[in-house]
Image (cartoon, coloured by chain):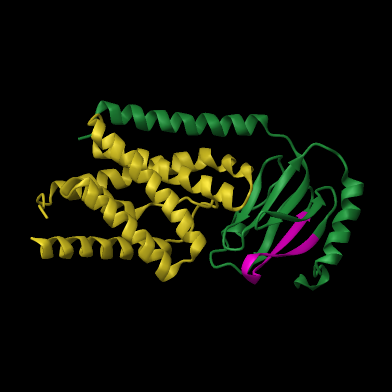
Chain colours: A yellow, B green
């Protein structure tokens, strides 16, 4: 059972990394920093449903560090960690409340991710005015979160629950 | 699959976003000065009333070409990978900003106080000190 766990988590981390890369190929279509689809969150959303919350956390954090070490730098790591951890926390709490479907969970996660990134940018760049980007990033986070939540829900419904 | 609570959450977040956008839109007023910061340190500032060009030397040796024209500030070119900062377009209202994350450059508009003449001489001085390549930006 242990090797199965390693294999499945490894596969999902790899998938998350690939999706990070694919996302970086999507051209910027809105001139606001931080607007993105959040394809990587698809893997975390699926892991929440077919695996456990702990596995989702592991995949999320390992992916963030691997991507930052491979393609990024210290500052991109800070942005990813802030977004990734805050969105994980919010999604975990909403899931545990059992009041929302995965679409609501993913939406709140998308907005939390963007909010976390603005906070780090305000700190790193020492510019409080960046909070002015929040309204746009709130709406873009909702849009991305709904799409990823619907997609993740449909995919997870077609996958067997894995016990690792 | 989608539950009532999801709709409330999604609707609530959208309303928050739209209301905040409207608040920002209706309370904004034209700014007076474009302030350039690199890595959190203010390196230059220019009055929006005076057309000028300036090359910002960002973190990691990157450059962003700043232009101020007709009361608005914008970047005409940059050597960062995505050039998102160039695509961000023109800013002129108090509180607006252009951000280049790779170079840690922020250009923000600051408001109302009209000190355009004294700031303008300051700006020229700073420009000279940092070796600003005013005429050498190519255009």
Magenta-colored span: B53-68
Q: Residue B65's spot in the image, x, y percent?
A: 71, 64
Q: Residue at x 42, y 49 (%)?
A: A83
Residue B59 magenta-drawn? yes
For the C terminus of chain A, the image quarter is bottom left
Q: Nearer the viewer, residue B32 or B76?
A: B32
Residue B96 image offset from top left, x and y in percent:
66, 44
In the drawing, does residue A143 fall left or right of residue B65?
Answer: left
Task: Identify the residue at image location x=61%, y=52%.
Answer: A125
Residue A119 spot, x, y in % from top left: 52, 45
Q: Quadrant of the N terminus of chain A?
A: bottom left
Residue A21 appears in view: no
Q: Main secondary structure of the magenta part?
A: strand
Decide: is A86 above or below B52.
above
Tell me where residue A121 appears, x and y as whole percent: 55, 50
User: Residue at the location (32% across, 45% down)?
Assistant: A147
């Amino acid at each position: 059972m242990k090797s199965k766990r390693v294999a499945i988590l490894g596969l999902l981390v790899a998938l998350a990394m690939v999706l990070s890369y694919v996302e970086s190929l999507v051209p910027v279509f809105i001139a606001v920093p931080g607007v993105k689809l959040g394809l990587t969150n698809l893997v975390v959303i699926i892991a929440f449903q077919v695996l456990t919350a702990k596995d989702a956390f592991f995949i999320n954090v390992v992916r963030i560090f691997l991507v930052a070490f491979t393609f990024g730098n210290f500052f991109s790591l800070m942005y990813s960690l802030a977004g990734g951890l805050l969105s994980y926390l919010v999604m975990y709490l909403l899931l545990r409340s059992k009041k929302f479907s995965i679409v609501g969970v993913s939406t709140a996660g998308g907005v939390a991710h963007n909010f976390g990134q603005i906070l780090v940018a305000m700190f790193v760049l020492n510019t409080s005015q960046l909070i002015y980007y929040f309204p746009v990033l709130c709406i873009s986070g909702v849009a991305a979160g709904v799409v990823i939540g619907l997609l993740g829900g449909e995919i997870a419904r077609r996958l067997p629950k894995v016990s690792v | 699959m989608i539950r009532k609570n999801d709709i409330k959450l999604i609707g609530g977040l959208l309303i928050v976003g739209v209301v905040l956008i409207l608040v920002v839109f209706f309370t904004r007023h034209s700014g007076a000065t474009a302030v350039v910061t690199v890595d959190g340190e203010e390196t230059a500032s220019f009055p929006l009333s005076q057309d000028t060009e300036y090359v910002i030397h960002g973190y990691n040796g990157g450059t962003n070409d700043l232009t101020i024209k007709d009361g608005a500030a914008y970047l005409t070119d940059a050597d960062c990978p995505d050039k998102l900062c160039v695509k961000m377009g023109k800013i002129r209202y108090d509180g607006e900003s252009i951000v280049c994350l790779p170079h840690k450059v922020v250009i923000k508009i600051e408001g109302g106080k009209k000190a355009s003449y004294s700031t303008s001489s300051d700006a020229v001085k700073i420009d000279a000190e940092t070796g600003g390549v005013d005429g050498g930006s190519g255009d």
